[in-house]
Structure formats: structure tokens, C-alpha cells
Amino acid sequence: MAPYSVLVTGANRGIGLGLVKEFLKNKDIQHVIATARDPSAAKELNAITDKRLVVLPLEMTCDDSIKRLYTEVEKIVGDRGLTILLNNAGVLLHYKTNQEPKRADLIKNFDVNVASVAVITQTFLPLLRKAAAQVPTDEFSSSRAAIVNISSGLGSISGNVWGSSPRGFLAYSTSKSALNSLMKSMSIDLKPDHILVAMFCPGWVQTDMGGEGAQITLDESMKDLVPSIYKLSNEHHGGYFNRDLTVIPF
């Protein structure tokens, strides 16, 4: 079975845009909802003519914006609820141990990459629970109800051998570790609801955020990542994975 509906945050470019395009290739998905801070400026999204796509505004750090998004999504998905919430939107403000302290940069990384994801996820739980309630079994799957998060291999604490790195990943990697911790806890809390929770590293992708030297193209990432999302089941609940579903140690 395919998911009935998918909501992708931060879909105006990069990985979010790639996810939207890849989901739209699946003709069994009924609704693909994409968010952008300014939909009128999201040229590539607006160029997609598929009638299943709806582009809605979202300012990640504004709770009123999140509530307005919920209202609009509820109108679209109705009683069947939201099948997949895909938390993709994020920021990377470069930060290193050996630099002048900049509290605002640290807070921005955490506000967007952790706090905003928490608030969005909590806000959309009623629609995810509606979707999960459609299935009377104990199964976990992305065609039932799922919270899928775009994390990063940089969020692995046990695998950290790079520190800040020359590119200044200190704040970003720490925020992704916190995101993983947040979602691991939520996976435990949401187990009775049969809402699957998983975190993915899409790889080092050639996007604006990936920057120079990125190893793979967006198409190469999506070719592995989206099929892996479709394969999610009970055994993956609360897990942290590469795009090919190999496990990343926390």
C-alpha cells in the first residue's frame, strides 16, 4: 500500500523539493503537501502541474503559522488524516569551537532544527492519529502513519570523529543529535498509537546546504531514500538510518 497523504516541510529547494518530486511519481498517493516560507517565490514547486500537489506557507519558528498550516492540511486530508509528516526543513549556520561565541547562531540552529520540529510534530499528532486509526492491527508502516525526519550522519554521537570540522558543523551536528534524541523519545511515547517514527541521513547531497564537495546528486539520494521510506515497518520504529536503511549508531 502507498501512503494516502504526505506533508513535506521546507520543500522549495534541495532535498525537500526532491522528495516532493519523487513522491509524485507514486500514482497511488492522493495528496502531496509541500511547504515553503514564501510559496510565491517557490518557482520550481509552482512549475509542477500535478493536481495532487498543494503548496502552503510555513514559517517554521512561528507557532501561528504552524497552526494555520494544520488547519489547511486538515481540510485537504479530511477524516483519513495525514499519513506521513516528513520533517525536512532545517538550517545550517556554521559554527566552530575556535571562534568568537555567537549565541544567536547556536539558538537559530536549535530553534529551527529541534524546537520547531517538536512543535510541528505535536501540532499534527491529531491528524497522524486519525490516519493510524484506519488500520486495526498492530503494524507500523509508512502507509499507515509515520513521522519521518531528515537528520544527518553528523548527528551520530558515537560516530563523531570530526569535531567542528573545517566547515563549522558544531552547532548543526549538535542540533541533529538533539533531533535524534527528541524523535527517539517521541517514538516511545507514540508506540501505543502505532505512529512510526524514523530518522534518515540522506547522504552528503549536492544542494545549496550540501555545498562544495558533496558526494552524491539529489537524484541519487532520492533513488534510495524514498523507497526506504516506503519499506519502513515495525522493526524500523525509533531507528536512525542511512538512505538505504542501513543502521546509523546513535
Image (cartoon, rainbow, N blue to C red):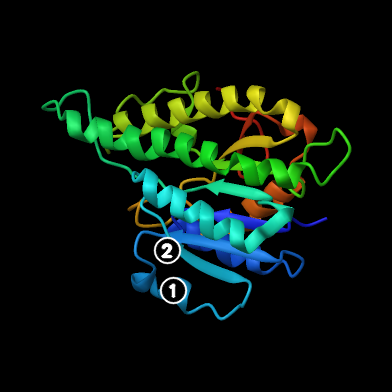
Task: Please tell me the numbered disc located at residue 124.
Answer: none
Where is the N terminus found, in terms of image quarters?
Answer: bottom right
Task: Please tell me the numbered disc located at residue 44.
Answer: 1
Q: Quadrant of residue 31?
A: bottom right
Residue 158: x and y in percent read 50, 18
Q: Residue at horizontal 73%, vertical 47%? A: 131
Circle nearer the N terminus (1, 2): 2
Considering every residue shown, the one lying at the far top of the view is 158
Residue 249: tell me if it is visible. no
Residue 94: x and y in percent read 25, 38
Where is the C terminus found, in terms of image quarters?
Answer: top right
Nearer-the-camera pick, 239 or 40: 40
Residue 208: tell me if it is visible. yes
| Residue where numbered disc 2 is placed | 12
Q: Residue at horizontal 77%, vertical 66%? A: 28
Disc 2 marks a residue whose amino acid type is Asn
Q: Residue at horizontal 49%, vertical 26%? A: 156
Q: For this view, does 145 lie left or right of residue 136?
A: left
Q: Secondary structure at mark 1?
A: helix
Q: Residue at horizontal 70%, vertical 31%? A: 237
Considering every residue shown, the one lying at the far left of the view is 100
Nearer-the-camera pick, 225 or 16: 16
Q: Secondary structure at mark 2?
A: loop
Residue 106: x and y in percent read 25, 30
